[in-house]
Image (cartoon, rainbow, N blue to C red):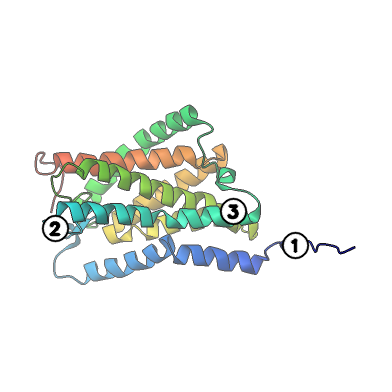
Amino acid sequence: MTTVPTAPETAKPTRRLLGVELLTVLGLSLGASGVGALISFTGSLTETLKLGQQVATLNGSRAPGRPWLDLVWQLYYIGRGLMPVVLVGYLLVREGVSLRVLGFDLGQKLRDLGRGAAVAAAIGGSGLVLYLGSQAAGYNLTVAPSGLPEVWWRIPVLVLSAWQNAILEEVVVLGYLLRRVTQLGWTWPAALAASSLLRGSYHLYQGVGGLVGNIVMGVVFCLLYRRWGRVMPLVVAHALIDTVAFVGYALLAGHVGWLPTG
């Protein structure tokens, strides 16, 4: 009687492999963005214009004067920006779990929405004050959250962009990063510092205010994630903060005197 060979059990990843995996994911996503932000900030510092007189546009047109092509490009970059989340989901399935282990699911919709809205209200206002203060003091570039033309798809694309940012950052820099460094044996203070500093690093292109503000936001988000065990309310919070910033700028820029436009 012929026996059918069984597939070998998947070996548990070593700490070295987990470390390589983590560096690869970050190198393909927000770690690379941090390096790019440092290069961008170095360029801004060496410009003849002061930081406060320079503009960092977050959602710019990708095909000026060609709105339909521009829309296709916008949707392409939003979709491409979520691919690291897909990669993390795949790696977690290989581990024998899923994104649910990070609390990225719809199992607690109302609670996540309520918590996220409360966090957004608390952080959004203080973040705006920090930005306006650092920009006025010359430590931050003028941030233009929207540079899209006034076409019918502008607001929907800005909302989608806000959610893409939120999902990418909270799944990768909060849930996944903290899980992996914990598996690597890092202490909680070290894990918190790594996540918060990384979050600040890829906002450095905005200036010192963007760096400091996002490090503080990272600390708060890490503490809340540790308490709740779910990234979803923090995805909601981040998405609401960015949606208000993106859409609010698109609607208010040039119509109110307190909002810098460059």
Identify the amino acid type marked 2. Pro
Residue depicted at 44% across the width and 59% down the height = 198
Disc 1 and disc 2 in contact, CB within 8 angstroms: no
Mark closest to the chain's N terminus, 1 or 2: 1
Residue depicted at 62% across the width and 68% down the height = 17
What percent of the width, then of the height, locates residue 119?
41, 35
Q: Nearer the viewer, residue 35 or 91?
A: 91
Disc 3 and disc 1 in contact, CB within 8 angstroms: no
Residue 182 appears in view: no
The quadrant holding residue 117 is top left
Specify whether 4 is left or right of 42: right
Q: Name the residue beneath numbered marker 3.
A: 92
Which circle marks residue 37 in the picture?
Answer: none
Report helix, strand or loop for mark 1: loop
Distance (Cα) linking label 3 and label 1: 20 Å
What percent of the width, then of the height, locates residue 78?
33, 52
What percent of the width, then of the height, locates residue 58?
25, 54
The quadrant holding residue 95 is bottom right
Which circle marks residue 7 in the picture?
Answer: 1
Identify the amino acid type marked 1. Ala
Position of the N terminus by quadrant? bottom right
Residue 76 appears in view: yes
Identify the amino acid type marked 3. Leu
Report helix, strand or loop for mark 3: helix
The quadrant holding residue 121 is top left
Q: Which mark's residue is nearer the viewer, 3 or 1?
A: 1
Q: Name the residue beneath numbered marker 2.
A: 64
Distance (Cα) linking label 1 and label 2: 54 Å
